[in-house]
Amino acid sequence: MTATNKKPEQKKTNSDKVYSTICLPDHDARIAELAYYKSEKRKFALGYELNDWLEAEQEYLL
């Protein structure tokens, strides 16, 4: 049995490209917080989780 000395493949990177990033707050965390307060107002009644999330999302985006 012969051993082959193969070099591991190197991952290709896009180091030539410069990406600009915008630091934004964590949207999902803020929406979750708003949805939590909506649920709290209803005394955490079950069955409204999706509505709370969607309403909070709409409020956040306004």
Image (cartoon, rainbow, N blue to C red):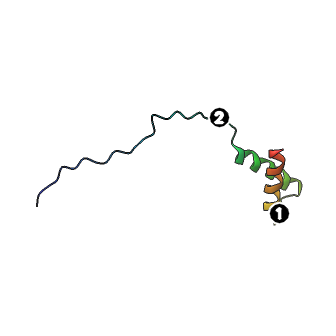
Q: Residue at x 38, y 45 (%)?
A: 11
Q: Name the secondary structure under disc 2.
A: loop
- Nearer the observer, 16 or 21: 16
Disc 1 target residue: 48
The furthest residue to the right = 41
Q: Name the secondary structure under disc 1.
A: loop
| Mark 2 vs mark 1: in front | 2
How many discs mark residues in the rendered view? 2
Disc 2 target residue: 22
Q: Residue at x 84, y 44 (%)?
A: 62
What amino acid is labelled 1 in the image? Answer: Tyr
- Nearer the observer, 22 or 38: 22
Lateral position of residue 47 relative to residue 3, left or right? right
Q: Earlier in the sequence, mark 2 or mark 1?
A: 2
Disc marking residue 23: none
Residue 31 is situated, as x and y percent measured from the top left of the image, at 76, 48
Lateral position of residue 46 relative to residue 24, left or right? right
